[in-house]
Image (spheres, rainbow, N blue to C red):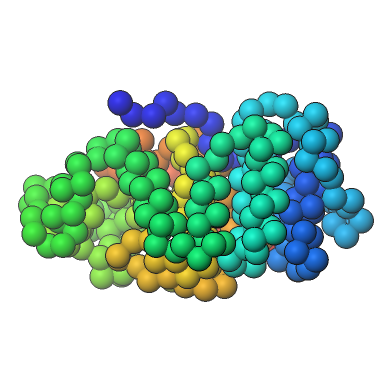
Amino acid sequence: MADALGPNMDLKIFAPSELDAVLRALRHVASVNDCFTDAERALIDGVARVHDVAIDVDALEPMPFEELACIVVDPHHRKRAVQLAMVMALVEGTPSRATERTVRRLALALEIDEEGLSVLYEMTHGRALIARFDMFRRVSRFLRNAHGFPGFLGMALPLFGLSGDESVAARYRALGSCAPGSFGRALYDHFLDNDFKFPGEPGGIPMVFHDVGHVLSGYSTDPQSELQQAAFQAGFARRDGFSFLLFGILQFHTGMRITPVAKGYYDLFDVHRVLRALERGAACKVDISEGWDVFAHKDRSLEEVRAALGIPPLELVAKAS
């Protein structure tokens, strides 16, 4: 049975008193290794700015986690605080053991059991293979419960060029006849320009929500843009969106190769851009992975579709960052 849909990964959820406490707790996590970097500052500042608050990050006093637990009591808010602490631990790459222990202490104080904590532990203790397996299993579970999942064999055979469905491929190739500027033509061009196989063709991926997300978000397919796309996808997903953000950080920042179709990259976590991508995804009114009908919108202009879904323009976000 599919997981129940929940709220998307919106960061703007903390009340003023909660926000101050969460930011101070993040400051605690960041400084436990006696080093407070510009990227760590940017993450705290970015979370504050999402809440329309300007702060002096260096003036924040670290907060004991027991105090945080008395202030942040809502389970959803607590979970988001733990997830932000995990992101903080990964901003500079593989976390120190002291940092990993601190994040676990925070999760314990808030009584939150976030799956990604085991991945963090395994990374910190040099168990990369187990961390990769755990992360792959988490993403696989998301796919298994997503709308239209054809089964793992149904995913694998086309991906490796061993099967296809010409009727499906023909529908996607027909998007080339849509007018320039339309959503359908933009999706067609995305496959063509990146030399991707169309769904239904041998070598094509049956599930298209990731590629649809690229078109709607405007993010390219270079490694740094893929990390932003992972954040955008985390934002609009109503079921374990954090798995995509964590996947993106691990694959495109810590060098962990989780899937066989993309190698791992290092040091691509631009904090402001990733937070903005997450914010843009959270503004999307629907979960693209839950059966959003590509063909029902193929003849609408791309900008009209973006506006209808509530996705902020990319250029405005770029200027703000």
Asked if residue 171 shows in the view, the reply is: no
Would residue 261 be found to the left or right of residue 281 on screen? left
Residue extending farthest right: 59
Residue drawn at (61%, 35%) of the image:
112
Q: Viewer-proximal residue, 281 or 100?
A: 100
Residue drawn at (8%, 59%) of the image:
162
Would residue 288 be found to the left or right of residue 310 on screen? left
Question: Residue 308, image x and y in percent?
Answer: 48, 39
Residue drawn at (32%, 37%) of the image:
146
Asked if residue 92 shows in the view, the reply is: yes
Q: Viewer-proximal residue, 84 or 226?
A: 84
Question: Residue 276, image x and y in percent?
Answer: 62, 54
Q: Quadrant of residue 290?
A: top left
Quarter containing the N terminus: top left
Q: Quadrant of residue 73?
A: top right
Quarter containing the C terminus: bottom right
Residue extending farthest bottom: 266
Would residue 253 be found to the left or right of residue 11 on screen? left
Question: Residue 13, image x and y in percent?
Answer: 68, 35
Q: Viewer-proximal residue, 158 or 308?
A: 158
Residue drawn at (83%, 43%) of the image:
64
Question: Residue 129, image x and y in percent?
Answer: 39, 62
Query: How many numbered callouts?
Result: 0
Above-or-below relation of 188 to 144: below
